[in-house]
Structure formats: structure tokens, C-alpha cells
Image (spheres, helix red, strand yellow):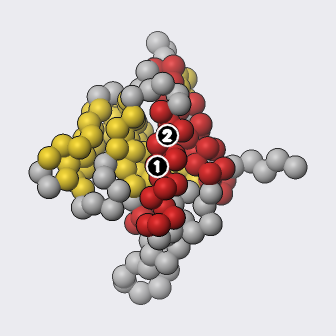
Amino acid sequence: MRIVLQRVSEASVAVDGRIVGAIGKGLVLLVGIKTGDAEKDARYLADKCVQLRIFEDEQGKLNISGLEAGAELLAVSQFTLYGNTRKGRRPSFVEAAPPEISSPLFDKFVEMLKESGLKVETGIFGADMLVKIFNEGPVTIILDSENRPVRG
């Protein structure tokens, strides 16, 4: 799984001109799922997203986690995060998991985020969405479950 995480002052997602998810100060999580991803990947990234210290403390240092800051979360599925651009000019999306795999895993990821007690909003899986992001800082971090520490 891969996530592009952005710290925001506010964000929303609309489908067919209707707002389906909106947050204030918090994090937007653009979530890509590839073939072979599993619940352990979702758990690792859900925990990482809420515990990552990317909110400023009194000294202006990125020292406060989203959990400690009471961040709101907006999770948006985005298969294009697995676009391969190595050859040609058109991205290949063969690494992205098909909807029958990625949709339930995305839902499980959202459930895991909600376990934190933070407000969690989403877009609509597979829909053509308009995402408005007011990136604060700007702070943008790329997380990938392939980068998690391996425990023996």
C-alpha cells in the first residue's frame, strides 16, 4: 500500500457536484493499493498515519502526532499511485489491485483509522472525485508499506 499524506487546514471531496466528505485541520490520505497488499499493510499504514509526528509544537517543531493534535482524516482511494511511467508516455496501472481486492482492503483501512477515535471521512471508492486540498506547511509525506521494518 502507498499513501500520499498531506497536512491540511481543510479538505473536501465531491462526487457529481455533491460534497461526500469534508474535514477541517488534519490529514488527507491518498491511498493506493497494489496486488498482494493485505491487512497487515493496512494496519501498518493506519497506525503510521495517526502516529506520525507532523503537527507543530509550541516551538514550531514537527513534534505532535495527528492523534495528539485531534486531527481529522480524509481518506481517498487512488489507484493512480501505482502508475508505472518507466516506458512510453502512458502510465501502466497493472500493479494496482483490482477493485474486488482494493475496495474491501480500503474499507478495512478506514475502519482501522476510525479505531483511533479521530473523525474519518472518505470519498466514494471508484467514483470520479473532485478533491480540494488546502495543504498546510506545505507538509507532504509518502508512506509505503514496503518500507516497514522487517521483524524476525
Estimate how packed mark 1 is, as few (under 14), some (14 to 19) or many (20 or more) residues with alpha carbons within 10 Å. Answer: some
From the top left corner, tell me how far across and down residue 50 is, in percent.
53, 32
Residue visible at 41% across and 87% down in the picture: 88
**Which numbered circle lies on residue 7?**
none
Return the residue found at the far bottom: 88
Question: Which residue type does callout 2 highlight?
Answer: Glu
Return the residue found at the far top: 58
From the top left corner, tell me how far across and down residue 149 is, in percent.
74, 48
**Where does the N terminus fall, quadrant-wise?**
bottom right
From the top left corner, tell me how far across and down residue 45 is, in percent.
58, 45
Disc 1 from disc 2: Cα separation? 6 Å
Q: Nearer the viewer, residue 133 or 103?
A: 103
Residue visible at 51% across and 46% down in the picture: 109
Q: Is label 1 in contact with label 2 (beta carbons under 8 Å)?
A: yes
Estimate how packed mark 2 is, as few (under 14), some (14 to 19) or many (20 or more) residues with alpha carbons within 10 Å. Answer: some
Lateral position of residue 87 relative to residue 18, left or right: right
Residue visible at 53% across and 73% down in the picture: 95
Q: Secondary structure at mark 2?
A: helix
The mark tally for this picture is 2
Question: Which residue type does callout 1 highlight?
Answer: Asp
Return the residue found at the far left: 17
Report whether residue 54 is seen: no
In the figure, 10 relative to 79: above or below?
above
Q: Secondary structure at mark 1?
A: helix
Q: Nearer the viewer, residue 104 or 77?
A: 104
Lateral position of residue 28 relative to residue 56, left or right: left
Q: Nearer the viewer, residue 136 or 16?
A: 16
* Disc 1: which residue: 107
From the top left corner, tell me how far across and down residue 132 is, in percent.
23, 45
Residue visible at 47% across and 52% down in the picture: 106
* Disc 2: which residue: 111
